[in-house]
Image (tube, rainbow, N blue to C red):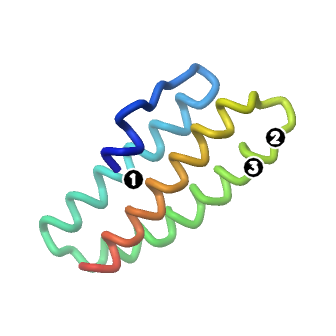
Amino acid sequence: MGLILKRFRLTETVLNFFHHVASLYNETMNAFLSKNQIKACEIWFKRNELTNEADKLINNTELEYEDKDRVKNMKRIIEYCKDMADLI
């Protein structure tokens, strides 16, 4: 995730989605550290919702190419959160 975020720059267009992804990441870390299996299951469902939201943003014809690329990077973070939830 560090490689993704190293050069990551936000724009107003994707800021709201970023907040959702950051919230998922924080929940994932808390569940991972506390070994909370119930929370890990909830993360799976949130992951599905955020992945669908990311796909809608990527397919949005009004969104600029750079913002679509940012959303794709955030989608990778979502997948990493799912992988961390798998380890719980």
Report the amino acid beneath label 3.
Lys
Residue that lies at the very extreme toward the top in this rendered image: 12
Asked whether disc 2 touches disc 1, contact meaning CB atoms under 8 Å apart, the reply is no
Q: Earlier in the sequence, mark 1 or mark 3?
A: 1
What residue is disc 3 on? Answer: 56
Asked whether disc 2 touches disc 3, contact meaning CB atoms under 8 Å apart, the reply is yes
Per the rendering, the mark at residue 24 is 1
Per the rendering, the mark at residue 60 is 2
Disc 1 crowd, CA 10 A, few/some/many (<14, 14-19, 20+): many
> Could you tell me residue 76's position as x and y percent?
50, 56
Disc 3 element: helix
Is 15 located above or below residue 45 in the figure? above
Question: What is the CA distance from the residue labelled 1 to the residue labelled 3?
Answer: 18 Å
> Could you tell me residue 27's position as x and y percent?
30, 56
Disc 2 element: loop
Report the amino acid beneath label 1.
Leu
> Could you tell me residue 64's position as x and y percent?
75, 28
* Quarter of the figure with residue 71: top right
Report the amino acid beneath label 2.
Asn
Residue that lies at the very extreme toward the right in this rendered image: 61
Disc 2 crowd, CA 10 A, few/some/many (<14, 14-19, 20+): few
Disc 1 element: helix
What residue is rendered at 23% in x and 58% in y? 29
What residue is rendered at 46% in x and 72% in y? 44
Is 64 located above or below residue 35 in the figure? above
Quadrant holding the C terminus: bottom left
12 with respect to 79 (left or right): right
Question: What is the CA distance from the residue labelled 2 to the residue labelled 1?
Answer: 23 Å
